[in-house]
Structure formats: C-alpha cells, structure tokens
Amino acid sequence: MTWEFEKRILDAQTEVKLRTDPYVRARDKVTRQLIDSTLIQSYQRFRRERQPYPFVAHSTLRPGAITPTHEYELHYNALVVMLDGVLDERLQKHFRCRSGNRLNKRNITSVAPTLPGLESYDHDRRFVRHHGFGELFRMLTELDYALLIQRPVEEGEPPESGEFQITHFHVKIERLLDSALHNLGVMLHYIDRSLYEKGEEYVELFERKFFEYFNFYHNAAGRRSAAALAAQLLARETRTATVFIASQQDRRLTLLSSWHPRMELEIEQFLLVKLEPERLLALKAWSKENGVELRRHFIINPASPEPVFLFRVRYQHTPAATPTPDGTLRTTLNPRERWVKIIEECFVPVNEGCCIRIEHSLAYPSRP
C-alpha cells in the first residue's frame, strides 16, 4: 500500500481572522476546549478505567455510513450553541432562555446542587477570554441540554463592545421536526408549500435525508437531533453561529457553522484516531523527511507505544442538498444520492503553538 501525506500551513486569511476577528478567536478557543473535554479527556477516562477506547472506524467517516447505535457511558457529551451577537425575540421561542436558566450560582444550585466544582464557582469565568473559562466550561458541559454563548452589549453601546460569554445553561431546543423539514424542503426546492403535498412516504424519506444534511445517520436523536434543529434554524436566519455537538454514540466533535449573510451550513468533525502499523511507519518517515515534529505537536499520548492523533474531516453539501440554481421545483428525491461529500481530511496539532496540518485520507481505502 502507498499512503500520501501533504503538509499544509495555516493560510494567511485564516491567520488574520484569528488575530483580528473576535468571533473567530472565541470560536477557536471554544473548539479547543471541547476537543480537550469531550475527546482527549474521554480518552484519558477510558485509560483510567482500564477500558479500551472505542476509536471511530475510518469507514464511518464516509457520508451516509451507518453509525453504530451503542452508547459509551465513559465518553463525555456536550451541546453548545454560540452566536455572534444575541438571540433576537423571534428566535428566543426556540431556545429556552429564561431567568431560571440564566448563568449564575443560584440557578445552577437549583438544577444541580451536587455538581462537582460548584463550591468554587466564579462568575467572571463565564467570559471566553477569562483564563479560568475552561474550568467553568468543563463543569457546565456535564449538565443536560445545551450551553448558550452569546455576545450581549449594554444598551446604547456598539456591538463590538460586547464580550463572548456563557449566558445560559440547561437550554432546551424547542422546535417541531416537521417545521424544520418544511423549511429545508422549501429552501432546497423539494417541496413548494405544504410538507405533505407529495404524501407521507415522501416525508419519511425526506426526514432521513434531513439528518444526512448534517452528516448524521438517519437515526440521530437526543443531542444530535437538537443540534440539527438549532443549526438549521440559525442558518435559515442567516446568523453567524456555530453549534457544537459531541455524543457518546459517534465519539466525535461536530461543528455546524453558519456565516452571515449566507444560508449555507459548514460541517466539520474532530475525532481521535489510531493508525495501523504500516500507515504509522509511513507517516513517521514522511514527517522526518518534511521536518514535522509528530511527537511534539500531533501525538496526544507521546509516551505510549500506540500513538493517538487528533483528526479533522470537513464536509460540503452536494448539488442535491443545495437550492436549484433557477429556483425550479425538483420532481424527484433520490434516496441513494449523497447530500454531503468530504472536501478535506487532515491530522491537526494538539497544541496552539503549531500552525501546520497534515492532509491525509482515512475515509477511503488507499490506492495499492
């Protein structure tokens, strides 16, 4: 077998955004915190319990792949909704953001009085920029439902004066699936007006494709279903936002992102991978030739004889999952036609001091 690797350096445009765009900086920090708390900490938890970590099968990275239904109790969950701004009144009916779940110690105590770390609660840590943000963030992701990160501003102050912060916890996503199906169906021109205008069988098939739109298998439920409903709604409203979801079933961190003023949705996933011996030897040889320090920047457990890497996959919607160019109504819905495709696979560094990524395909068999 021959394996191909390619060295990529952080592009200038992304580097500028990380330095100058407050939302991109805050989003990057939240992503790193979730990688640590849902992936790396889960791996370490399995190690402490002397249980083998359930690495994701490489073949399940392919769009439309069947996801096993088993849930691993030792793996950490998370559901986080992050907005560049705040939820307006029109959206608040879909996100339970009431006074009882506004972030403060009294409200947390009423919901989870025995939550570990509650006795040392510091309200200033709610700010993403705070050095203690990670501790509070990890503590709150233990709770059910979602965390909401917003950028509120004082009345009369400019939007750029606001700071990204956790404003609410225990947030329920309250939205009917039929409403989400209807909105997506109209946007993609699969239906004209009524969800059931083509019959119940058509709706059942479209529901399966609805979850595929977010690169979830059709049996997505719980946090993943809530993430899909929230992300589709925020994208429809052309809000700059990211929905982060990690579940015990698929053992990966998924980011569903929308960017104003587009209605498009970006999908990326992070997961932990372990390589077969031959591929690992090839990667080590390649990294030595190209001056890439695997042990220092890419291996999560450098002291282990079986190194573990952080891997990222980015997906893009196919023409079947984008609006028709001229707005004409589609006459058919092909269940075998994929709605997402892979556009990038790469090993990513586990620390912030490295701006290199290693492009490599794991989803599909290598060429002989």
Image (tube, helix red, strand yellow):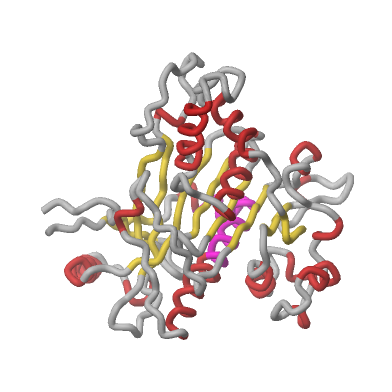
Q: Residue at x 41, y 48 (%)?
A: 314
Q: Position of residue 343 (x, y in %)?
A: 36, 44
- Residue 362 belongs to magenta span: no
Residue 16 is covered by the magenta coloring: yes
Q: Residue at x 35, y 85 (%)?
A: 303
In the image, residue 348 lies at what x, y percent?
Answer: 40, 62
Camera sees residue 343: no
Q: Nearer the viewer, residue 166 or 96?
A: 96
Res. 166 image quadrant: bottom right
Residue 234 percent coordinates (x, y): 64, 40
Left/right placement of residue 84 relative to residue 264 reads right
Q: Is residue 224 left or right of residue 209?
A: right
Relative vertical location of residue 170 with respect to residue 215 in this rendering, above or below: below
- Residue 257, given in percent of the width and then of the height, sits at 55, 45
Which residues, given as a range, are shown in magenta?
15-34
Task: Inspect this view and state whether residue 313 appears.
Answer: yes
**Which residue reaches farthest front?**
200
Q: Which residue is drawn at 28% across and 82% down?
A: 305
